[in-house]
Amino acid sequence: MIFRLPKSRGEGVGGKPNLLTVPMLPLRDIVIFPHMVVPLFIGRERSIHALEFAMGQEKHILLCTQKDPRKDEPREGEIHRLGTMAAILQLLRLPDGTVKVLVEGKSRAITRQFLPISQFFQVEAEELLESWEITPETEALRRTAIAGFETYAKLNKKVPQEAMQSLVGVDDPGRLADTIAGHLSIKADEKQGLLEMLDASRRLEQVLGYVNRENEILQIESRIKNRVKKQMEKTQREYYLNEQMRAIQKEMGEKEDLKGEIQELERRIRRKKMSAEATGKVKHELKKLKLMSPMSAEATVSRNYIDWLLSLPWQEKTKDKHSLEEAERILEEDHYGLEKPKERILEHLAVQSLVKKMKGPILCLVGPPGVGKTSLAKSVARAMGRNFVRLSLGGVRDEAEIRGHRRTYIGALPGKIIQSLKKAKTNNPVFCLDEVDKMSTDFRGDPSSALLEVLDPEQNFGFNDHYLDVDYDLSEVMFITTANNLFSIPPPLQDRMEIIRLAGYTEVEKHLIAEQFLVPKQCLANGLTKENIQFSENAIFTIIRQYTREAGVRNLEREIASICRKVAREVAAKSMEHLVKVTSQMVPKFLGVHKYRFGRTEEADEVGLTTGLAWTEFGGELLHTEVVVLPGRGKLTITGKLGEVMQESAQAALSYVRSKAESLGLPPHFYRTLDIHVHVPEGAIPKDGPSAGITIATCIVSALLKIPVHRDVAMTGEITLRGRVLPIGGLKEKIMAAHRHQMKTVLIPRDNVKDIKEIPARILKVVDLVPVDHMDEVLKTALVLDDPDSLFKPVPPLVAPEPVYVAVEPPTAEIQAH
C-alpha cells in the first residue's frame, strides 16, 4: 500500500500551514463524516449564534463532537479537537425558537486554537487532506467492504436504498470508509475513532470489521425473530386476545389499579412485623409480582401468597390475665364440677405469672360426649383473656388439611392450622382441636402424624406449612384437644399431650347443672320467663332418670328444650302471664312414655344371671351376663357380639371353674357331658375388654351349682387361670352406672382401691364397694348362700400310689431258644 501523510490545504508565509478562523458547533452523540449531508436541529443559544455568524461569512463551520453528551455548556477541553469542516446548505428557523440546518461535510479539520469570544465557540482550524493510491490490497478491501455493506443494507431496513447507489464508482478508500461509517449503527466513540483515523486503508479495514460485526448481530436478531414468529403462529389467537385484553386494561386503567395495589402491598410490608425469613420471602415475591402481567395466573398466585403472609399474626398477641381469683370465678361460672381441668388451668396461670415466657401446654380432655369438653376450652380462653379458635378434626383423612398444599397446585391454600390462626388474629390463642380421636388414614396421608410436630413443644416453634414454606412459631399457642376415647389415638401423639379425664356427671350434678344452666338457657332461647315456666326438683330428676341415659347433659338439655317449646306454645295461645309448673307427674304429658327403666333391678335372684359393669364412650353401663347349661359334649358357646379379648376372658373363666371343680362339688369330668352357653344381651352392640372375667366366672358357677346370684350386686374385674382378680380401668364411670341403677354392692379389684378417691362422696354413701383379691371372695359375696364358707369343700392332697411288686418267673429254655 502506498500512502502519503495528510497535509494541510495550503502553506502560509514561512512554510506554516494556513489556519481558517471559523465558528465551531459542538455536537451531542453524533459524528459527521466528510461527504455526508445531514440535517441538524439546534436548540442551544450559543450554537444558534455560531450558525448565524457562519451564515454571515462564507457559510463554513467546524462540527466537533462533545466527549460527554449530557453537558449543555461544554468547555473547551470537553470537545474533541478533530472534527469535520462543513458547509451550511440551508438554515430554517422553527416556531419554537430552534433552528433546523442542513450541512454537508467537506473535510477533516483539527482545532489548533480557541478564540476568546463569549457568544459562541470560534476557533482557528486546519484542514487535513489525505492522498491515496489504488493497490490490489486496497481494491480487495474496497470490494469486500461494499459487499459487506450490501448485506448490512439488506438486514437493516433503516438503511435507504440510495446509500448503496452512492457507493457505486467510489474508488477513494477514505471516502468509501466515511460513507459506510455514516450509515452504521455503532457507538459515537467508535465513529469518532474512525474520524480521527487518517490512514484511509486502515480506516476502511476497521470499517469492514464493524460491518461484519453488525451483520453477525443482525443475523442473530433475524434468527430470534423467526423463532418467535414460529412460536407466535402456534399461539397466535391467544397472543392477539392477550394483546386486546392489555389494550382494554390500559383504557380502563387496570394497570393503574395494579400499580396502586403493589404500592399498598409495599406499605403493608413496611408496617408488618414478621420474622426475618418471612420478610425476605415476601419482598422477593413482590419483586417477582412487579414483573408479571396483572392478568397472568402466576400474578394471582403471587398476590394470594403475599396476602397470606401479611395477614398472619406474626407478633400480634393478647395480654394474659394473671388474676387467679378472676380466672377461677369465670371457670366456676361456666362449668359445674370438672375439678381436675380447672386446677390444671389455674396452675398454668400461676406459673405464667411467675415466668416471663413459657411453652404453651398441650392438654387432652378425654371423656364421654356432652360433659363439656369443648365449652371448657372456650371458658379457658375467656379466663386467660385470649382469643379462641376451634378446629374439628372429625373425618379428616388428608395430611394436607394440617400442613397445607404446595403452591404448585391450582387453588392451593395453607393448612387448617394456619387458616385458624389467621382467623384468631393473634399468635397466642387458645386453640381447640376437637375430636382428635376421629381422624382416619388413607392413601393421601396420615393427619395424626402431621399433628406430631404441631403438638410437640420442642418442635412447634418452627412449624413449616407446605404453602407458606417459612417457619411459623406455634410455641405460644395453648392447644387443647378433645377426645371420647384414647385407644384410637396413636401412642406417639398421646405421648405429646397431657391427658385429663372428664368422667360423667352424677344425678345430683346433672340436677344442679340443669337448674343453674340448662333451664335458664332454654327459657331464654324459647322466649319464656320465670313467670311462664317453673320446674320442680322431682321433674328434673324424672327427666334425668327416665328420659336420658348418658354421662353428659346433652340429651337432658334436649328434653328440657322440648318441654320449653310445648310450654311456649301454650303461652302464645293463652297469654304472656300464663304459668306452667312442670312436676314429675306432668313430664310424661310433655315427653311421652318413659324411655328407660330406673331403679328396677331383677325382681328375684336368678341362677346364671350376673350384673357386670362396662365402660363406654358415653360413660359407664350395666352389663348383664347370662349362662345356660345344656346336655352336650363340652362345647362352650359365646354370643352377644363379643370381641376377641372378651371371648378369651370367657375361656379363662371356664378353665378356672374346671380347676375348682372338686372343691365346688362338681364331678371331675362334668364338662364332657355339658354344653355351656354364655350370652351378653343387646347383641347388636360390639363389646370387648377383659373386665367381664369375674362376671362370666360367677355366672358359670351359678349355672353349674344352681345357686342364684344377688340381684343388687354388680362386679368388674379381670380373671386369671388361678382365680386372681386383676385391676381394670374406668372405675369411676362404672360405679356411677351402678349408682344410677341402684346397685347396693359393687365388687372391685383390690388394686383399684386407689381410684376410689375420684368417686364423689355422696355415691360412696349409697354404694358399698367391696375390694377382692381372688375369685373365691367374689363367689362368696355374689352367690346367695346361707353359709358362704361352705361353698368350697376341702380337697385331699394328691398322694402318689404305693408301688406294687409282682414276682416274675424266669423264662423257660424253650422260650430262650426261640
Image: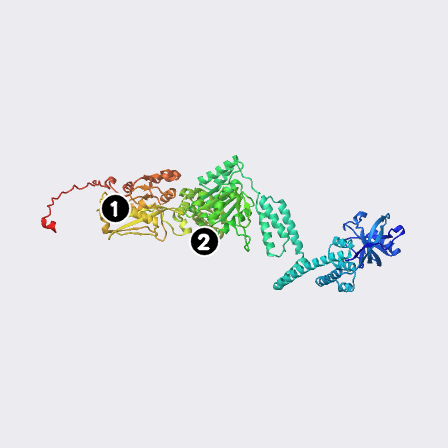
Identify which residue is drawn at 66% across, 51% down. Answer: 260
Can I make out residue 442 in this image?
yes
Identify which residue is drawn at 46% across, 54% down. Answer: 443
Would you name the residue on which mark 1 appears? 658
**Which mark sits nearer the N-terminus, 1 or 2?**
2
Whether 338 is drawn above or below 157: the answer is above
| Viewer-closest of 794 and 709 | 794
- At label 1, the amino acid type is Arg
Residue 344 drawn at (x, y percent): 46, 39
Q: Are marks 1 and 2 in contact (CB under 8 Å)?
A: no
Mark 1, mark 2: which one is toward the viewer?
2
Residue 532 drawn at (x, y percent): 48, 47
Q: Farthest right residue? A: 13
Can I make out residue 75 in this image?
no
Question: What is the total number of numbered labels drawn onto the structure image?
Answer: 2
Residue 503 image label = none
Q: Farthest left residue? A: 813
Identify which residue is drawn at 65% across, 60% down. Answer: 224
Q: Is residue 309 left or right of residue 506?
A: right
Residue 300 drawn at (x, y percent): 60, 54
- At label 2, the amino acid type is Asp
Q: Is residue 516 left or right of residue 722?
A: right
Residue 226 drawn at (x, y percent): 65, 62
Q: Is residue 77 left or right of residue 478?
A: right
Q: Is residue 122 left or right of residue 183?
A: right
| Viewer-closest of 460 and 360 | 460
| Viewer-closest of 321 and 185 | 185
Q: Residues within 10 Å of mark 2 (few under 14, many from 20)?
A: few
Would you name the residue on which mark 2 appears? 442
Q: Secondary structure at mark 1?
A: helix
Work out how far the residue at label 1 is from the one at label 2, CA to CA, in angstroms. Answer: 47 Å
